[in-house]
Image (cartoon, rainbow, N blue to C red):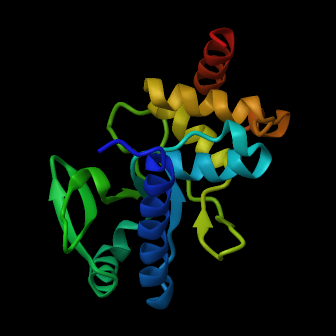
Amino acid sequence: MLTAAAYDIHVEQLLERMRRFHVALDTAGISYRIIGGLAVFIHVFEHDPERARLTSDVDAGVARKDLPRIIEAAEKGGFRFRHVAGVDMLVDADAPRARSAVHLIFVNEKVRPEYTEAVPASPPDRTKENILIAPVVDLVHMKLTSFRLKDKVHIQDMDGVGLITPGIEATLSPVLMERLREVRATE
């Protein structure tokens, strides 16, 4: 049945999954940062709630060395570890689905060998709920490195609310700066 509350339901499910992940890792003293579309959503929402676009999953940047501890902590939070199609993820133990998982991305490593940059690991920002999220500078680097259509849209979203500053532009390699110009030229 159709419902006009579909967006609200999805947001709550997404945030609940992020909160459970946060509690599990925070309780175990494991460092992480929310990255990807959800982190972009949170940063954009802070500046202009009407321009924030939702994402379908939770991506988290973690250190590979912490993976055994993450798996153990996540099990206590109702997650189960899965490695599917080359992706490490935490699925809900009760309803394991890859599309609604927490995807684990390893900081200081390239997601794909052909990528120009590794996932950055700057100190994370904290939300008022104490959840750790990647700073905008790291998100810009990641999105311009991946450079898929949804990454370009995330760049447009961050740029549209003034989050991509000259200071952030100064951190970009020539390749990433050219990609930023390309995105800006299509707006």
Q: Quadrant of the C terminus?
A: top right
> Would residue 134 be visible to someone looking at this image?
yes
> Would residue 61 be visible to someone looking at this image?
no
Taking depth in this image into account, of 53 and 117 the one nearest to the observer is: 53
Q: How many marks?
A: 0
Residue 2: x %, y % from top left: 35, 42
| Residue plotted at (26% across, 82% down) | 75
Taking depth in this image into account, of 19 and 34 the one nearest to the observer is: 19
| In the image, residue 109 above or below residue 140 | below
| Residue plotted at (56% across, 59% down) | 121
Extreme residue toward the top, this view: 185
| Residue plotted at (31% across, 73% down) | 67
Residue 155: x %, y % from top left: 62, 31
Q: Quadrant of residue 159?
A: top right
| Residue plotted at (48% across, 82% down) | 23
Taking depth in this image into account, of 142 and 103 the one nearest to the observer is: 103
Position of 61 with respect to 160 (left or right) is left
Residue 125: x %, y % from top left: 69, 64
| In the image, residue 9 above or below residue 30 | above
Q: Quadrant of the N terminus?
A: top left
Extreme residue toward the right, this view: 166
| In the image, residue 167 above or below residue 74 | above
Residue 102: x %, y % from top left: 35, 61
Position of 18 with respect to 104 (left or right) is right
